[in-house]
Image (cartoon, rainbow, N blue to C red):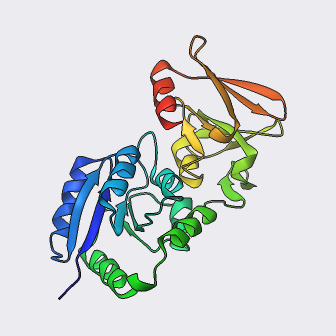
Amino acid sequence: MIETINALIVDDEAKAIALFQKLISEFDEVNVVAVAQNVDDAVDAILEYKPELVFLDIQMPNKNGFELLHEIRDFNIQPTIIFVTAFDGYAIEAIRHSAFDYLTKPVDLRLLIKAIRRYQCEKSKLNGKENIELVLNHLKPGKIKFNTRTGSIFLAPEETLYLQAEGNYTEIFLTNDTSQMVSMYLATVLEKLPVHLFFRISRSVAINLGYLKQVNRKKKICELEIEGKTYEVRIPVKYVRLLDEKM
């Protein structure tokens, strides 16, 4: 008799969940106990249903998939995580070397079969907590390459205070009070950076949350602080709410 695998699907898009459920229906042994469209609901579902396997999207509004790992890292319940994402770049490199498995969208049924069969073969040896810690440890990158008009520069995420779009370019403001102009769109730059550290506070500006000191709703500004020096960045009202939800 084949042992049943209780699974949770986490994705902010209802259509993506429906498509994935259709693929999962090919497996009689996989029982989808719940679905969640955000991290908070996913945490509640993990506590309630205690799934063995979580199919987890990375890019979600407010809180992303990596933040879910941070929130459950100290739980007694430690499911095995399989990332399901359209995201590429830095994050994929991190999970490729540390996660149990990952699938890229649109999900190929053959690769899903391979991932589930691998889980069935290895589940007795898996340690969910170690798996989660390994992923989180790999999300601490060294320097990242960015293209410039004259060549390239190499920066560590912690060197970046905030970023501002300038047409086809992005100006990266650094913690040493200098800046670098890179010949890349802001969205492209953000794909290279840790998604759990950087947050877009407007269409043209993203900040490093590690340096966020406070948000002034009345003045509509974010205050960033590094070594006693404060920087002010404008934030539209609707992004204040999104930032509150994320933090």
Answer yes or no: is residue 106 visible.
no
Residue 107 on image: x %, y %: 29, 67
Residue lying at 68% horizontally and 58% vertically, measured from the top left:
144
- Identify the residue at the far top of this view: 218
Residue 6 on image: x %, y %: 27, 68
Q: Is residue 202 left or right of residue 33?
A: right
User: Eyeballing the image, is 5 above or below 138?
Assistant: below
Residue lying at 72% horizontally and 48% vertically, measured from the top left:
158
Answer yes or no: is residue 232 visible.
yes
Q: Is residue 173 left or right of residue 69?
A: right
User: Eyeballing the image, is 75 above or below 238?
Assistant: below
Q: Is residue 197 left or right of residue 33?
A: right
Q: Is residue 99 left or right of residue 9?
A: right
Q: Quadrant of residue 82?
A: bottom left
Residue lying at 51% horizontally and 44% vertically, measured from the top left:
187
Residue 123 on image: x %, y %: 39, 82
Q: Nearer the viewer, residue 104 or 146?
A: 104
User: Eyeballing the image, is 80 above or below 165?
Assistant: below
The C terminus - image quarter: top right
